[in-house]
Image (cartoon, rainbow, N blue to C red):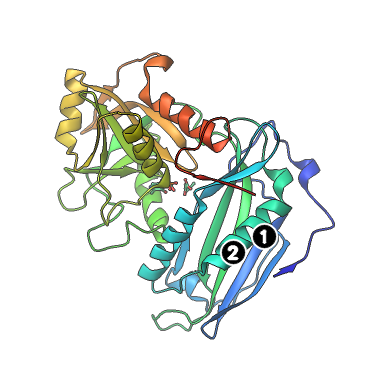
Amino acid sequence: MKIEKTSHSRIRKMNFKNIDFGNQYSDHMFCSEFKNGKWKNSIIKPFGKIMFSPISLVFHYGQAVFEGMKAYKDKNEEVFLFRPEENLKRINRSAARLEMPTIPENIFMIGLKNLINIDRDWVPKYYGQSLYIRPFLIATNGALSAKPSQDYMFIIISAPADTYYKHPLKIKIEEKYSRSASGGIGFTKAAGNYASSFYPTRLANEKGFDQILWTDSSTHTMIEESGTMNVFFHLKNKLITPKFNDNILGGITCKSILSLAEKEGFFVEERNISVSEIIEGLQTGELREAFGCGTAVVINYFKTISYKENNFDLPNLSEKERISLYFKKRLLDIQHNLSEDPFGWRVQL
Ligand code: PLP
Ligand code: COI
């Protein structure tokens, strides 16, 4: 792999005390091209503009998939990735569904590890902060006929990250719009899934909500997930999350919480959850907590859930009583190498 380092690092301009999620990028990026059926020209080079033909399929038919992952520092400023093999598996599931080539493990891992090593000074050192890493795969060639591209580019960029949401969330259960439908691409991290959510999310934001709680597209009676998060409910002493299906993005944070919770003896259920069960739990007080989880968000609890224009406030628990904050700390402690790693999730660079 070719490595061209920048002679003009921008790191001195980076204010690590005031990190704005996703608005400042590290010095380098990784690129690899897929041409004539082969991966070639892997390179780490200075972060910068890339040029594609206007007929590239990514611009017309949306062949684009991405990932979100993070690198963390421990007290000695050693750098760790968290379950990167899960992101590789997921981007390849997404790619296959969008009729794109899968990325070989060595290209993904060698590109990723070298890139983050070169840019390791960009990994913030404080607890809860991280370097957010964005691998993505796009179609770079085509013609205006609607069929898959022959050429693709796989790119990795990264951005220092702090808290995504700075407060507990107000969530609206969606009854009209859908994020995904059975047989569709909801289980993939396809760029189009996010584009289609922007309009209903803006409508929800205008009514004072932070995010939408998506429901199934045919009946709007079953809970799926939230904007950039999978969801958990602490209901009747059980920790319940909707079982992954082809409408739901199988989150790595969600899977990690499930593994930790099961190991630690919590009553855990992965199953279908209806809107009426949640509303009943809100009315009776049996729903102690509801929270979202994801790489960017980490874990954030919901303050209010709204359904059919009625706002239901969740119990006002102390920090100590919150199962969401317990799992947030468990995860961050593992990610920052502050506690044992019983499942071997950390990958040291
Ligand atoms: N669901 C959606 C739609 C997301 O965008 C994300 C964020 O990546 C998640 C769930 C959580 O997935 P993960 O924990 O792998 O980041
Ligand atoms: C992530 O958590 O990695 C996401 O993909 C969220 C992102 C859309 C901001």
Query: How far from the left and from the top, in percent, is residue 150?
Result: 49, 82
Determine whether the beta carbon of the residue marked 2 sits less than 8 angstroms from the nearest atom of ligand 2. no
Look at the image and tell me in which quarter the N terminus lies: bottom right
Q: Label 1: how many residues lie within 10 Å, few (<14), some (14-19) or many (20+)?
A: many
Name the residue located 39 percent from the left edge and 47 percent from the top edge. 251
User: In the image, is 312 to the left or to the right of 325?
Assistant: left
Name the residue type under label 2.
Answer: Ile
Q: Is residue 314 above or below residue 340?
A: above
Spot the residue most to the right: 7
Q: Earlier in the sequence, mark 1 or mark 2?
A: 1
Quadrant of res 32: bottom right
Q: CA distance from mark 1 to mark 2?
A: 7 Å
Using the image, tell me which numbered label, if any, was put on residue 29.
1
Using the image, tell me which numbered label, if any, was put on residue 331.
none
Q: Decide: marks 1, 2 in contact (CB < 8 A)?
A: yes
Name the residue located 42 percent from the left edge and 58 percent from the top edge. 90
